[in-house]
Amino acid sequence: MAIFSNGKWENLLYWCLAFFTLFCFYECGYIFNEGVCVRFEKNPTIRIPEPFFSDILHHLENLITIRLVIGTVFSWILLNKFPENTNLYIALVLLLLVVYSIHNFYRGIINIVTMPLEVLLKYLIPISVFVKIDEICQALIIVMLVVVVVRTVEYASKKKYVSWIRVTRNVDVFRIKYYIVINIILGMLAYKDVVPVAACGLSLLFLLYRIGSYIAIKRLQSVITVINNSRKMHGTDK
C-alpha cells in the first residue's frame, strides 16, 4: 500500500478502506463455499465446526447480503474520491464474483486457473482504485511475481494437479529460493525502470519474512525434539 500512497496518510487510510471493501466481496465466496459447496464434496476440507453448519445455512442469505451492501456502500465512497478507474474497478469486482462462483461449483483441474485469478483479483481490485491506468501493468507484474505465481505453484503441488511439482515436501525452503530469484528479477526490472524501486523492497520484505519463519520453525522443532527426548529418558512420555 505504501508504494502507491505517495507518502500521504490520507491515501493510506483509503487503501485500508479499499482492502476492507474487497474482503466484504471476497468473504461472500468463502461463506457460500464453507456453508453450501463443501456438503457436496467427497473429501471436503472442513473449516467450520459441525454445530455451526446449521447456523451458517440459516443465515446464509443475510450473511452474504450484509457484505454485499457494505462492500457496495464503501465502493461508492472510494469511487467518489478516486473516480478515474471506476469502470475497471466495477469490472474487476464482478469478475471476482464470477470466478469465485466457478471455483466453488467446479472442482478439478480448472481450479489451477480459478485459484490464481482469485488471488490476483484480491490484490488488484484495491490497487485499481488508486493507481493510474498506465501504472496498472506495473502493479500487475508486482502482484504476479510476489504473490500469485508462488501461491499457484504451491496450490498445484498440494492438490497434485501437476505430478512433477513437489514443492510441498519442503514449502519453506521453496519459498526462500523463490523470493531470492524474484528479488533478482525485480532488481533488474527496477534497474530498467520497468517497475518502481519500491517494489524491490516489497519482495525483499517477503524474503526476510520467509527466512525468519523458516528459522523460527526449525528452532521450535529443535526445542520440541529436546523436550520429547528428555521425557523419554525420564519415562515421563507415557
Image (tube, rainbow, N blue to C red):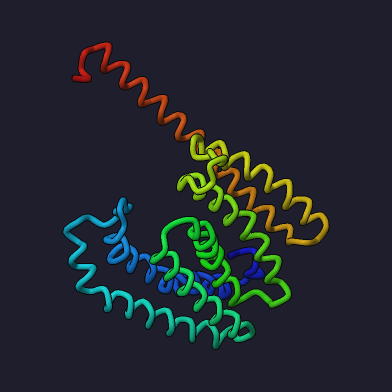
Query: Is 155 left, or right, of 199 in this rendering?
Result: left
Rendering coords of residue 86 (x, y %): 58, 85
Residue 202's x, y, as percent?
63, 54
Numbered-mark total: 0
Which residue is pictured at 68% across the width and 48% down the height? 182
> Hey, which residue is sitting farthest top in the picture?
233
Q: Is residue 209 left or right of residue 231?
A: right
The answer to whether residue 128 is visible is yes
Q: Is residue 226 left or right of residue 170?
A: left
Residue 212 can be seen, yes or no: no
Judge whether 42 appears above or below 209 on screen. Answer: below
Task: Give the position of the N terminus as an image quadrant.
Answer: bottom right
Q: Nearer the viewer, residue 205 or 171?
A: 171
Q: Quadrant of residue 103?
A: bottom left
From the top left corner, tell me how far across and down residue 208 is, in percent: 59, 43
| Residue 185 position within the rendered picture, expressed as x and y whole percent measured from the top left | 73, 49
> The C terminus lies in which quarter of the figure?
top left
Say which residue appears at 62% left-offset and 82% top-offset: 85
User: Residue drawn at (50%, 77%), measured in percent from left and top?
Assistant: 93
Q: Is residue 189 depicted above or below 5 in this figure?
A: above
The residue closer to the viewer here, 31 or 233, is: 31
| Residue extending farthest right | 192
Residue occupying image coordinates x 20% and y 61% = 52
